[in-house]
Image (spheres, rainbow, N blue to C red):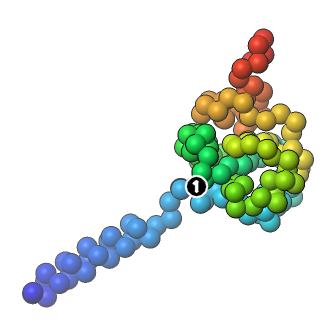
Amino acid sequence: MSTIELLIILLCLGALYFVIAQPTDDDNTFELTPEEFEIFTQQKDDPSDEPVTVMFYAPWCGHCQHMKPDYLRVARRHRRRMRLLNGARYPKMMRRMKIRGYPTVRRFRRGRADKEELRDRSEKGIETFAKGGRKGRQGKKGKK
């Protein structure tokens, strides 16, 4: 093998490593631990009164896996306001938050959960809910 061929191979491997090693916008970017959850929902360093949104999910939940791509698309547009918490990994947190099923999406303002939970699991419904709207109430007659 010539020096030039070896150099080309090394350059290709270096480029491949560079592409693989780059951070991506996968769901790990948005994952919270219970400690991070407390900080995120308290919003102590955020002067705005905009809500933050958390999707509580389980990896084995089919409904969660169906909804998660839409949630992540919206989360990428609202980076500072949306996160995920793996309830199967943190069952104590689920009991404390009184979450009985997956997926559950809640909004928080200054550490307190809104009474309303997301009902409309479409991308548009998630977007509206995350912005503080009430459209997340799909299925209720006479209400939009």
Task: Return the x and y of residue 116 as percentages of the image width and height.
Answer: 83, 33
Q: Is residue 4 left or right of residue 93?
A: left
Mark yes or no: residue 99 visible: yes
Q: Residue at x 84, y 53 (%)?
A: 95
Is residue 15 or residue 34 the one in the foreground? 34
User: In the figure, 13 relative to 36: above or below?
Assistant: below
Residue with the mark numbered 1: 27
In what element is the residue under mark 1?
Answer: helix
Q: Is residue 137 left or right of residue 96?
A: left
Mark yes or no: residue 43 visible: no
In the rendered image, the residue lying farthest to the top is 142
Task: Return the x and y of residue 64 as percentages of the image width and height.
Answer: 62, 44
Is residue 41 or residue 57 the one in the foreground? 57
Q: Residue at x 76, y 13 (%)?
A: 141
Is residue 4 or residue 130 the one in the foreground? 130
**Quarter of the image that includes the C terminus:** top right
**Quarter of the image that includes the N terminus:** bottom left
Q: How many marks?
A: 1
Is residue 20 or residue 48 the one in the foreground? 20
Q: Is residue 144 left or right of residue 16?
A: right
User: Picture quarter containing residue 77?
Assistant: top right
Task: Return the x and y of residue 79 as percentages of the image width and height.
Answer: 65, 51
User: In the figure, 118 relative to 52: above or below?
Assistant: above
User: Picture quarter containing residue 136?
Assistant: top right
Q: Residue at x 85, y 47 (%)?
A: 98
Task: Return the x and y of residue 25 as percentages of the image width and height.
Answer: 53, 56
User: In the figure, 10 relative to 61: above or below?
Assistant: below
In the rendered image, the residue lying farthest to the left is 2
Amino acid identity at mark 1: Asp
Q: Is residue 41 left or right of residue 29?
A: right
Q: Residue at x 29, y 76 (%)?
A: 13
